[in-house]
Amino acid sequence: MELNAVRPLFDSAWYLARYPDVARAGCDPFRHYLEHGAWEMRNPNPLFDSDWYLETYPDVARSGVNPLVHYQTIGAAGNRDPHPLFDTRAYREACGPLPRDVSPLEAFLSGTRQSCAGAYLSAKALETVQRQFLDRVKVVTVADRRRAPSHWAVFLQCGRPSTHSRWLTSAAKPWHLLANFYDDTYNCPIAADMVLAQNRGTKFTAVYRLLEDNPAFFDAYEYVLFLDDDILVTEDAITRLFTLVQALDLKLAQPAVALGSANTWPVLLKRDDTVRRYLNAVEIMMPLVSRDALRLGGHLFAHCISGWGLDFTLGDLVSRAFGPRRIAVIDAVDFLHEKPIDVVGGAYYRMLRDNRISPLVEERMMSLRYGAKGPIQEAGAAS
């Protein structure tokens, strides 16, 4: 049973090259793996990490089952992942139905379904996909109407479905609006101090391109609020947010998420009994980033197309560089996140899949590269 189940996932040549002691002993590599290697946390192929699998799924560790056997007979059907570089669910969504007796990992390793999102043979392979994406991103300045300097800026990712038409006015504001359009609506009138047009990609790749082309692009501002297109807010609320964050001398912050919003982290939902709560990180849809934090973490944008993992990693860098209690959610100001989060059918996530990007794999690799991971949680007492 075990022999038939896992043989398609066992790479004898790779195993012998990876573990030369087995080659020197003259053992049959497959038999060695079944009888000894699996229990010694040896790996049967480059995309099955036995140690990671057992750590990620402790129920398997407790069961005492060979981890590869568990994956092939049970785990794959439940969309469990064999390796940090393999996102089983994304691979299925990108590649379509597989034969009932073929696991996603088997399909990938056999070469029948290789070029799909969610599966990368190595960290270098993921970086190649990311680099190909980033090299095609262009951001051009359509108009620069900035006259008087400002200490604050809002970098608004916007396009046809953006909510900005419901809250943005032509009234004078104490902050610059940098409107970055991801579609052809940049020719429409908008009360922005700077109008940018992005040919493709995400908010994070736009920031990457701006910093790559001009590392000092954001240096004029003490704080920049990076705002998604589906956030409903008021200009007064944005001003209050900047004012409070500067008064509190924070390096990284965000407004509370209004009750009734689509949300990922309940800890970020608005509370009425505090002005601010210290956190280990803020989420990526509306972070307010200080000049110092942006200089410190600007390089991170080159490693993350989707934004997943950027929040944890930037928070960790800021905490270590500037000490505790420099990151907070501001409960005194709340923004509404309107759009449901749909990681399967949402246009944003479909675009990422079409470009062979798995947010989950990006998050894992950010964690492995920099040592930071979630969840977002409170880091001190509220006040």
Image: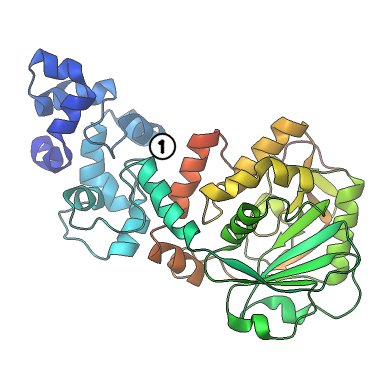
Query: Can residue 322 be seen from the camera position used here?
Result: yes
Residue 58 locus on image (x, y percent) = 39, 33
68 to the left or right of 54: left
Residue 306 locus on image (x, y percent) = 52, 56
Q: Mark 1 points at which residue?
A: 56
136 to the left or right of 58: right
352 to the left or right of 286: left
The answer to whether residue 260 is above or below residue 186 is above
Residue at 16%, 36% (x, y): give it. 11
For badge 1, the amino acid type reads: Thr
Residue at 68%, 44% (x, y): give it. 281
Colouring: rainbow
Q: How crowded is mark 1: few (under 14 residues within 10 Å), some or many (20 or more)?
A: some
Quadrant position of the C terminus in the picture: top right
Q: Quadrant of residue 37?
A: top left
Residue at 30%, 44% (x, y): give it. 121
